[in-house]
């Protein structure tokens, strides 16, 4: 059975492993006190449910004046949220059943600007697999936010983002020359393999879907890993990549 590793546990493992400094966003367990603290350090941050996926339970919080902060994202039920709230009101939005002794596990993550030259948020999905006892990158694709989603910065196909080949992202959207393309691709592969090895050392798995951003200095940033990754997006981008992943799965 594949163990679901929460986002906070992922951060702790990656932060204590061999990951390059700066390749993972600062992450803490959610609490009102930590939310206050992060808002003193960062203009933007993300609050994410610790184990959810598909763009649910994730919010971008932008620091605002008069202790009113913009929270923009999707609830656990997929409802779109876009409001200006105090920290206390944000907490009540996230934890509506706390008074009944029930609370959801969330994390707070430093906001990383992973945007194209034109300002559209993007992320990169890297699919790694354990083949013959060695981790390899089996496929890479890119996701770019649609215009209506730019404000929340949430890049997820389930929320309407566009999927495209990684080469198109680098050439047409990031406007990189061939040398920079090769260098960035190599760095993305290296950090993804390192992250896979680190998490699998404690929670063995055979494949991961890794969401990666790229900062202004063209350094890859690991957002999170998924130990039960979907692969439909690869079929849309390049059926050959999808087939390669499927063939590898048969031998895992």
Image: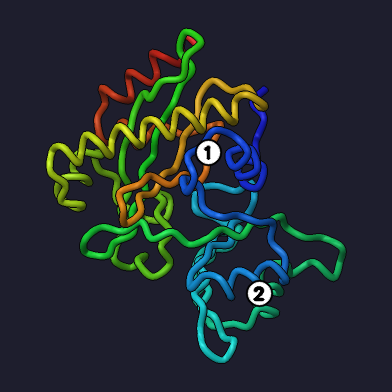
Which residue lies at the image location 24% right of the left edge and 30% below the top edge? 238
Q: How many other residues sit within 10 Å of disc 2, few (<14), some (14-19) or many (≥20)?
A: few
| Residue 75 placement: quadrant | bottom right
Residue contact between numbered discs 2 and 1, judged by CB atoms under 8 Å:
no
Q: Nearer the viewer, residue 199 or 123?
A: 199
Q: Looking at the image, is mark 2 or mark 1 earlier in the sequence?
A: 2
Does residue 205 appear anywhere in the picture? yes
Residue 54 at what x, y percent from top left? 50, 48
Which residue lies at the image location 51% right of the left edge and 37% below the top edge? 19
Dot 1 falls on a residue whose secondary structure is strand
| Residue 115 left/right relative to 87 | left
- For the N terminus, give its image quadrant: top right
Residue 37 at what x, y percent from top left? 65, 71
Query: Which residue has dot 2 on it?
Result: 36
Which mark, residue 186?
A: none
Which residue lies at the image location 61% right of the left edge and 60% below the top edge? 108
Dot 2 falls on a residue whose secondary structure is helix
Which residue lies at the image location 26% right of the left edge and 22% below the top edge? 240
Select label 2 or label 1 by which is in front: 2
Does residue 145 appear anywhere in the picture? no
Residue 51 at what x, y percent from top left? 63, 46
Please identify the residue farthest to the bottom as the structure is shown: 66
| Residue 100 left/right relative to 222 | right
Q: How many other residues sit within 10 Å of disc 1, few (<14), some (14-19) or many (≥20)?
A: many
| Residue 148 left/right relative to 41 | left
Which mark, residue 225?
A: 1
Q: Nearer the viewer, residue 34 or 81?
A: 34
Spatial CA distance of label 2 from label 1 is 27 Å
Q: How many marks?
A: 2
Compared with residue 244, is residue 54 higher up or lower down, i.e. above or below? Answer: below
Compared with residue 7, is residue 35 higher up or lower down, i.e. above or below? Answer: below
């Amino acid at each position: 059975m594949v163990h679901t590793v929460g986002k906070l546990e992922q951060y702790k493992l990656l932060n204590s492993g061999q990951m390059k400094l700066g390749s993972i966003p600062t992450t803490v367990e959610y609490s009102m006190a930590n939310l206050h603290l992060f808002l003193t350090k960062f203009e933007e941050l993300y609050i994410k449910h610790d184990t959810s996926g598909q763009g649910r339970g994730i919010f971008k919080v932008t620091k605002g004046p008069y202790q009113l902060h913009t929270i923009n994202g999707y609830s656990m039920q997929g409802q779109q949220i876009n409001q200006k709230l105090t920290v206390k009101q944000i907490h009540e939005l996230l934890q509506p059943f706390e008074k009944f002794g029930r609370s959801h596990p969330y994390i707070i993550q430093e906001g990383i600007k992973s945007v194209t030259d034109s300002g559209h948020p993007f992320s990169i999905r890297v699919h790694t697999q354990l083949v013959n006892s060695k981790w390899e990158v089996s496929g890479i694709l890119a996701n770019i936010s649609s215009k209506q989603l730019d404000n929340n910065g949430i890049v997820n196909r389930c929320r309407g983002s566009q999927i495209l080949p990684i080469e198109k992202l680098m050439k047409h959207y990031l406007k990189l020359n061939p040398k920079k393309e090769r260098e960035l691709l190599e760095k993305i592969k290296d950090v993804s393999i390192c992250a896979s090895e680190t998490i699998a050392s404690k929670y063995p798995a055979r494949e991961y879907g890794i969401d990666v951003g790229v900062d202004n200095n063209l350094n890859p940033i690991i957002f999170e890993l998924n130990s039960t990754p979907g692969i439909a997006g690869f079929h849309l981008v390049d059926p050959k990549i999808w087939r390669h992943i499927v063939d590898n799965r048969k031998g895992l």
